[in-house]
Image (cartoon, rainbow, N blue to C red):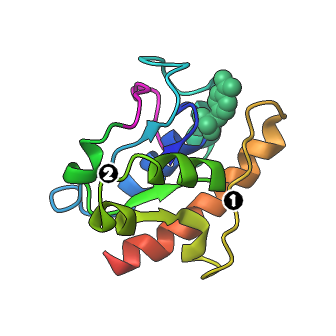
């Protein structure tokens, strides 16, 4: 699960998908394309919205997406089109490229919609992001 800062959207996506899959069989992680918040916990607003729905994401720590992630993961979900392009720019070959997906295409195939960046908005933005990611992760979990 990849966004820009790895403190708002992708930590939620990580926590939500982890809550829906068998963690003995599936490894779910998140990262950011930027290094602004390395080592930080998720944004308090993400922590709070997760807690509202019974998830604890407080212990996550922000990290930067790395080229090694193409080797470690089978699927790389980008939250928005800018994240998608940034990840693709690091791909070494077609196999890497094919791992990168826009997460909302799970709900709306081929529509290339973005999960809006809630960082500069209020709590409603986080609620909205949570709902989108919950719906997308239901579909991902079913496929897994
Ligand atoms: P995220 O949100 O990409 O969902 O973690 C953001 C977090 C921080 C910044 C931008 C977006 N920032 O500019 O610091």
Q: Residues within 10 Å of mark 2 (few under 14, many from 20)?
A: some
Image point (54%, 64%), residue name = 103
Answer with left or right where residue 49 lies relative to residue 37.
Answer: right
Q: Where does residue 121 sit, x and y in percent of width and height?
A: 84, 34
Q: Where does residue 90 sit, x and y in percent of width and height?
A: 40, 46
- Which residue occupies the extreme left position in the image? 24
Image point (84%, 34%), residue name = 122
Query: Is 60 part of what is drawn in magenta?
Result: yes
Near-viewer residue (90 or 38): 90
Q: Quadrant of ligand 1?
A: top right
Residue 8 in view (yes/no): no
* Above or below, 124 relative to 16: above
Image point (30%, 53%), residue name = 92
* Above or below, 125 relative to 45: below
Q: Which mark is residue 28?
A: 2
Q: Nearer the viewer, mark 1 or mark 2?
A: 1
Near-viewer residue (58 or 108): 108
Query: Is 38 part of what is drawn in magenta?
Result: no
Residue 141 in view (yes/no): yes
Magenta-drawn segment: 55-65
* Above or below, 144 relative to 8: below
Q: Secondary structure at mark 2?
A: loop
Q: CA distance from mark 1 to mark 2?
A: 20 Å
> Label 1: which residue?
114
Near-viewer residue (22 or 102): 102
Q: Main secondary structure of the magenta part?
A: loop
Q: Earlier in the sequence, mark 1 or mark 2?
A: 2
Answer with left or right where residue 15 lies relative to residue 115.
Answer: left
Image point (66%, 62%), residue name = 132
Q: Secondary structure at mark 1?
A: loop
Name the quadrant of the C terminus: bottom left
The CB of the residue at mark 1 lies under 8 Å from ligand 1: no
């Amino acid at each position: 699960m990849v966004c820009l800062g790895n403190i708002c959207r992708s930590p939620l996506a990580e926590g939500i998908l982890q809550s829906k899959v068998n963690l003995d069989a599936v490894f779910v992680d998140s990262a950011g394309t930027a290094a602004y918040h390395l080592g930080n916990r998720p944004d308090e607003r993400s922590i709070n919205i997760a807690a509202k729905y019974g998830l604890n994401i407080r212990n996550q720590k922000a990290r930067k997406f790395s080229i090694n992630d193409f080797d470690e993961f089978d699927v790389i979900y980008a939250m928005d089109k800018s994240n998608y392009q940034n990840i693709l720019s690091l791909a070494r070959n077609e196999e890497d490229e094919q791992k990168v997906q826009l997460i909302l295409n799970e709900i709306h195939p081929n529509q290339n919609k973005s999960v809006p960046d809630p960082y500069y908005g209020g709590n409603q933005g986080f609620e909205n992001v949570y709902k989108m990611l919950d719906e997308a992760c239901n579909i991902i979990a079913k496929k897994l």
